[in-house]
Structure formats: structure tokens, C-alpha cells
Image: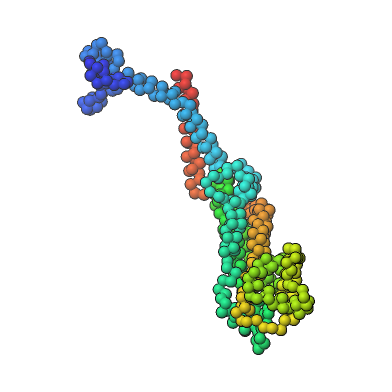
Amino acid sequence: TELLCGHKIPVKLGIIGVVNRSQKDINDNKSMKETLKSEKDFLRLNYPEIYKKHGNKVLAKTLQDILVRHIKKTSPILHKSLQDTKIRLENELRTLQTPDSKVSFILNLLKNISKSYTDTILGNRKDVSDKIVMGGARISEIINEEYLDKINQINPLHDLSDEQIGVILLNTSGITKSSFVNEKALEHMISRQLNNLIEPSMSSVDFVRVEMLKIFDAIDENVLETLKRFPRINSDVRNVLNKMLEEKLNNLKDFIKSFIETYQSCLNTTNPNFLIQLVRSSTDIQDASIAALMNNNTSKHTKNKKFVSVEDDENEIQQKNIQHFKQMLSGLNDLDNTMETSKQVKLHKSLTKSYFDFIREIVRDFVPKRIHHKMVKLVLDTFEQELDEKVFTPYVINRSFEEVMTEEEGVIDERQKIEDMLNAVNIALKNMVDIQCF
């Protein structure tokens, strides 16, 4: 009695004694009703003062009361969890539902795909990721940071040593000793060095294409899950996007390559912007004794006038330098003196570097804009129309809606599983309401 009353072993919720069925009871097929009656008789006979507080019926009621109290205590959290689960399952079921009208379903699906893809690239999604850079931001990173870094790291004189420049100067001079600026050598070296701008520009286009394919797998999750239910539609949509990007990629790469090749074959050393840049970087060229040569050349025409007067203001100095460089690069100087080979190498090396830097500025500004305009923007502007023409219209013409709406294996089972889970959640919510009134 003292043990059952909790005097010997203190227990927080107390002790409830029960009489379990013996093996003999099981062998004799003794019913539960008889077992409970035997238990009650045993407890009344042996523990007459406390028998009403023990037995299987008391234990069952006590456990039920404990469970109900616990449910009531955790009800707000549990209710919210069940509601969230219900909403999630309903959304999943909505995604997996069988459409009443297959035509309107496919048409709306294609529009949702196009809209979600466009929103992802333009940054109009409501569910903005805070984990990784994605969508249009990643494209911008490729063309405005990674590409420009590669272009800026290119050495204008890569794989062009002083010895090679000297040999080029000699070979392009033929039997005549080269004097001042050797235009053929300069054209050859500049064209050769500008070739280094082509590969990174082509790679940038490839990287953007790959990223635009990746972005498709990052569109709205519900739209993507609906699309994946139908393998045929999924394949057709992806093929359209892939072909669009492939077409834009080839056209764009051809255009960019042609753009750079134009500067390789058509040098314009009298371009005002180039001359200004040349003046700003003319220290290296003056180190090659060009300043001295210009002074001699100028004194031949203007007896006592100096190349640069200390009294001239900055603009006048720049204009005079531009004029001299323009004469020099246009072959208008009547200088008959020849330069030492080392100085001539240094001059052409500096001119090649300056012209490369000049064209690099043009290319690094042009390529990102061209990629954005002729690949990214063009795809976004025409994607919905392409899906309509290349996917939806053939379905209408071929009357293949039943065929293309064939679901992926396992979708039917998944739908039934979600329906069963949703029913269970609804029952749980109803029971919670009943418990609150218990």
C-alpha cells in the first residue's frame, strides 16, 4: 500500500497499479471484460482503501487526461504547424492537380514560364535569395566584372619581345632602311596584339549562355514543378530556349569577332581620341628621343620656335603635341635622319602599347553592351512569342494535347499520397477543436 501510494518511491504523477493478463489467461482465452472484473476484485480485496485509484481503467483515463492537457498547452504551436502543413500540401496538390481544360492549362503554363524566367533575370521576383548571387545579377557579374578583369589583365605587349619587334621592323622595311615610323610594322604588331582580345570576348558570350540556361532551373518553384510533371512539354520548352541562345550566341560571337578584326585590319592612328591618349602617355615615346627629333623637325620649318613653350597654357601644349604626333603617324615629317635600332624599337613598342590600350577601351565598353542587347534582352523580349510559335502552336496543329499531357511516372502516386496526408491533417485540426471543448 505504501508503495502504491508513492510513500516509498516518490513519483511526480503518482503510481497506478494494474493487474496484467497472465499467460494462463491468454491460453484460456479469457476476455478483456473478465480480465478487468478480476482485476477490480483483486484490488478491492487486497487494497480496499485505495482500489478506486488503481487499475487499467484508471490508468487509461489518467493517460488520456495528461495527453489532453499537453495538447491544450501546446495547442497554439501545434495548430500553427498543422495549418502551415495544410497550406503546403494544398499548394503541392494544386501543382499536381489534373486540369479541366488542357489547352488553357498549357497556354497559362507557358506564359507563367516566360514571366518567371523574365522576372528572375530582371530582378522582379518576390522571393529574392539572400544566399547566392543569381539571375540577372549573375549575368551582370560575368560581363561587367569577370570579363573586364580578364580584359584589363591582358598585357598589351604579350609575347612581343624587343628582339621580335626589331626583326619585324627589319623584315617590313625590305631593302630600304626604315626611318621614323614604320607603318607596316606597326600595323602588323597592333593586329597581332589585338588578337588577344578575341578569346576572352568569345568566352564571355559562352559564360552568359551557360548562365541563362542555369537561370531556367531557378525560376518560380511551383511553375518549375508543374513543368516537370510533363516530360514532353518540359523537353520542348528547354529545347526552344537552348536553340534561341545557340542562335544568338553564334551571331553575337561572329559580330564581336568581326568588330575586333575591323580594328585589326583598319588602323586609324590619326583618331583624335587616340592622339589625346598618346599625348598623355608620351613620356615613354619621348624617352625614345622623339621629342628631340620633333624639335629638329620643327626648327627646320620654324627657325626659332620651340616644340613646347613654357609660356603656353595646357590646352595649347596638348594641341601642339597632338599636331606633331599626327604628322609623325601620317608620314608628313620630312625628316631624313634615321634612328638607332634600339630607339626605333622603343618607339614602336610604345606606339603599339598605346594603340592597344586605345582599342581595348573601345572593346571593353562595346562587348558587355552588345551581349546585353543582342543576347539577354533579345531572348527576354521574344521568349514568350517563341514558346507560343514553337511549342503551343504545333500542339494545336497536331492535336497532341493528350499526348503531351502524359504525366511523369510516380506523379499519380505522389498526388494520392498528398491527398491522404491532407485528409489526415484536416482530421487532426478537427480533433484539436474537439479537444479544446473537452
Q: Name above or below for residue 146 compared with residue 352.
A: above
Task: Name the foreground residue: 230 vs 255.
Answer: 255
Residue 167 is drawn in which quadrant?
Answer: bottom right
Task: Name the foreground residue: 414 vs 334.
Answer: 334
Residue 320 is drawn in which quadrant?
Answer: bottom right
Q: Residue 183 location, x and y as percent? A: 68, 78
Q: Name above or below for residue 407 compared with residue 270.
A: above
Task: Name the foreground residue: 397 vs 228.
Answer: 228
Q: Which residue is at the far bottom?
A: 175
Q: Which residue is at the far right?
A: 302
Q: Quadrant of the C terminus?
A: top left
- At 59% from the left edge and 63% from the top edge, which residue is drawn? 152
Q: As drawn, is 56 to the left or to the right of 45?
A: right
Task: Name the foreground residue: 415 vs 340.
Answer: 340
Q: Residue 69 location, x and y as percent? A: 41, 22
Q: Residue 212 location, x and y as percent? A: 59, 55
- At 73% from the left edge and 63% from the top edge, which residue is drawn? 314
- At 31% from the left edge and 21% from the top edge, which residue is drawn? 12
Q: Quadrant of the N terminus?
A: top left
Residue 226, can we see it? Answer: no
Q: Name above or below for residue 191 compared with residue 396.
A: below
- At 68% from the left edge and 74% from the top edge, which residue is drawn? 291
Residue 338, can we see it? Answer: yes
